[in-house]
Image (cartoon, rainbow, N blue to C red):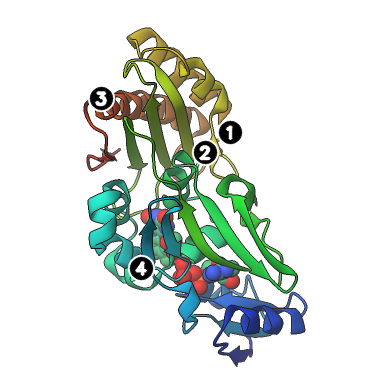
């Protein structure tokens, strides 16, 4: 690991100013779960680390009836997993967090770091995409809020500027008659990073039969987390039928672009996408028909 300056700002504005001073040669440092590994490997050699962990404005998880869930960038995986508020109002997130990595990583890794790293083999992005989450970003030239989808650019690449800090994730309150399911599949062990992760959210129309808003978010099968918009469109306005489920699952498997690697071949991963989309869709639809709150059954599909 190279020598670097260590900085500890007390506010977001101070952090952004520090990042600006180093002109792209400094990195924000949150839990360090990702950064410590890539620095040890020599893949990143920052001249300065801007430790943002003491910045109060980046902390906390709250619910506002109009804005929805506001999750501070410094919320750790473990905080989300054990949050009473999240357990009551957005239990899908608790269930997903229980399956992220291991307790050591969950204790230090943050939501902000998870999203800002642009790592492809992660879980949270799919669930947040399915829920139409937005991210708030601060920089020297001001604040902006963008749909989460616009954060991800490519493998390990995000649209964050070098002097910007992701400050919070905003999840709007889901409409009534909404059901969601997330299923991850690990091809080596259950604590491994996912090989495929699929989130499906269905919000039914007032008739409680036809699909209104449908989100199918796929992770680990493209350079960035993605929505299978062609598959989503097949369902919108229709009641779910076995044929439609099959068609949409096949469309999602076509839309993604997995690569062959140690976790499985391209063909294998497309097959897994098809199976998981099919399963997640059925569960999400069932939940939407029977409940007005979000519920998630634990979603580990199993190991090969
Ligand atoms: C062994 C292991 C297993 C894992 N398994 C899973 C898994 O199953 N599912 C899953 O989803 N993830 C998994 N991960 C990824 C893990 O969740 C992330 O590495 C972690 O959340 C990163 O958060 P951090 O706070 O430690 O980020 P850091 O390592 O501190 O930072 C990560 C990157 O984001 C930048 N950054 C951090 N915070 C901000 C911010 N607020 N604004 C702007 N930039 C920022 C940093 O500069 C750096 O480039 C795993 C990681 C490990 C090491």
Distance in Å between CA atoms under marks 3 and 2: 26 Å
The residue tagged with tag 3: helix, strand or loop?
A: helix
Identify the residue under disc 1: 257
Q: Residues within 10 Å of mark 3 (few under 14, many from 20)?
A: some
The residue tagged with tag 1: helix, strand or loop?
A: loop
Distance in Å between CA atoms under marks 3 and 4: 33 Å
Identify the residue under disc 4: 105
Q: Is mark 4 within 8 Å of ligand 1?
A: yes
Q: Is residue 95 visible?
A: no
The residue tagged with tag 4: helix, strand or loop?
A: helix
Q: Is residue 249 left or right of residue 180?
A: right
N-terminal-most mark, 1 or 4: 4
Residue 286 tag number:
3
- Quadrant for the N terminus, please: bottom right
Q: Do the residues labelled 3 and 4 touch (CB within 8 Å)?
A: no
Q: Is mark 3 within 8 Å of ligand 1?
A: no
């Amino acid at each position: 690991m190279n020598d670097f300056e260590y900085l500890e700002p007390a506010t977001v504005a101070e952090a952004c100013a520090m990042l600006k001073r180093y002109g792209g040669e400094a990195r924000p440092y949150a839990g360090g779960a990702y950064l410590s590994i890539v620095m040890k490997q020599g893949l990143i050699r920052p001249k300065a680390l801007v430790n943002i962990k003491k910045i109060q404005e980046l902390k906390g998880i709250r619910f506002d009836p109009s804005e929805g869930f506001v999750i501070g960038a410094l919320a750790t995986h473990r905080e989300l997993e054990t949050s009473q508020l999240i357990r009551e109002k957005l239990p899908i997130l608790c269930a997903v967090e229980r399956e992220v990595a291991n307790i050591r990583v969950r204790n230090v890794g943050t939501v902000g770091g998870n999203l800002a790293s642009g790592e492809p083999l992660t879980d949270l992005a799919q669930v947040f995409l399915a829920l139409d989450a937005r991210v708030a970003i601060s920089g020297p030239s001001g604040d902006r809020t963008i749909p989460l989808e616009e954060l991800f650019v490519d493998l390990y690449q995000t649209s964050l500027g070098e002097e910007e800090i992701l400050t919070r994730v905003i999840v709007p309150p889901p409409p009534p008659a909404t059901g969601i399911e997330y299923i991850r599949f690990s091809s080596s062990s259950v604590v491994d990073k996912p090989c495929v992760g699929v989130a499906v959210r269905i919000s039914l129309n007032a008739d409680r039969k036809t699909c209104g808003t449908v989100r199918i978010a796929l992770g680990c099968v493209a350079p960035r987390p993605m929505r299978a918009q062609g598959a989503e469109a097949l369902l919108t306005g229709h009641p779910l039928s076995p044929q439609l489920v099959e068609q949409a699952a096949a469309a999602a498997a076509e839309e993604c672009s997995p690569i062959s690697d140690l976790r499985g071949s391209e063909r294998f991963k497309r097959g897994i996408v098809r199976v998981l989309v099919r399963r997640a869709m059925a569960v999400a639809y069932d939940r939407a028909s029977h409940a007005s709150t979000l519920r998630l059954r634990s979603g580990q599909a199993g190991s090969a």
